[in-house]
Image: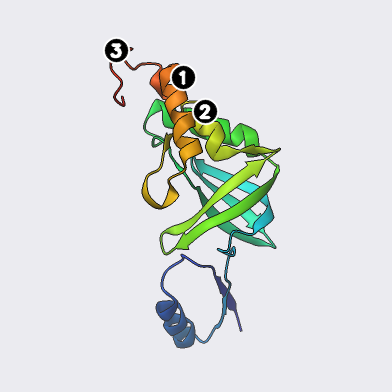
Amino acid sequence: MRGWVLGTGHGTLALAVFLAASLGVALTVSAGLPADGQTLHCRSVKVIDGDTLVVEHQGEQVTIHLAGVEVPSLDHPWGVQARHLVKSMVRGEDLEVTVVRETEQGTWARVVVSGRDLSALLAQSGLATASRGDDADSELAAACEKARDVHTGMWTDVNRSNQGAP
């Protein structure tokens, strides 16, 4: 009998159970990463974009969205720069991943590599803006403001008299 592994955020459980039963296969449901704020040691597998990466924890690959920041998409030059920065930091490295929240849309976490918080590094480099709402963080907002004030990263092109976002 073949088995399937279903991590959280990969479709609905009811559909998976129905399909598994219909096809006569075993279904293993894994909980992914815990959402209780525990820091886990993971291995970097792949960087998808500036704020999304795949990590491996206990043999399971999990997609992580960096909590606290919004990064331009890859069709924007600063999004490409953000992805490059994250890749250069995490390539083959062990990561400390602290899950902030987990929803059907995915897992949001703070990720630390070599003692540096990736969300803070992106904010300080002017390659991200601070998230609002659930992921709001005053330290990240301050880092983004400072990057904007000194015209770093995506804030380089902002007219110095215009304090609005590009």
> Residue 112 falls in which quadrant of the image?
top right
- The residue under label 1 is which amino acid type? Thr
**Mark 1 touches mark 3? (CB < 8 Å):** no
Residue 80 position within the rendered picture, expressed as x and y whole percent measured from the top left: 46, 30
> Residue at position x 51%, y 26% from top?
125
Quick one: 138 or 156, which is closer to the camera? Answer: 138
- The residue under label 3 is which amino acid type? Ser
- Residue for badge 1: 152
Vertical relation: 80 (above or below) 23: above
| Of callouts 2 and 1, the N-terminal one | 2
Residue 59 position within the rendered picture, expressed as x and y whole percent measured from the top left: 68, 62
- The residue under label 2 is which amino acid type? Gln
Residue 38: which numbered mark, if any?
none
Element under disc 1: loop
Quadrant for the N terminus, please.
Answer: bottom right
Q: Tag 3: Cα neighbours inside 10 Å, few (<14), some, or many (≥20)?
A: few
- Residue for badge 3: 161
**Mark 2 touches mark 1? (CB < 8 Å):** yes
In the rendered view, does 26 fall on the left or right side of 165?
Answer: right
> Residue at position x 49%, y 30% from top?
143
| Of callouts 1 and 3, the N-terminal one | 1
Q: Tag 1: Cα neighbours inside 10 Å, few (<14), some, or many (≥20)?
A: some
| Of callouts 3 and 2, the N-terminal one | 2
In the rendered view, does 96 fall on the left or right side of 47?
Answer: right
Element under disc 2: helix
Vertical relation: 62 (above or below) 144: below
- Residue for badge 2: 124
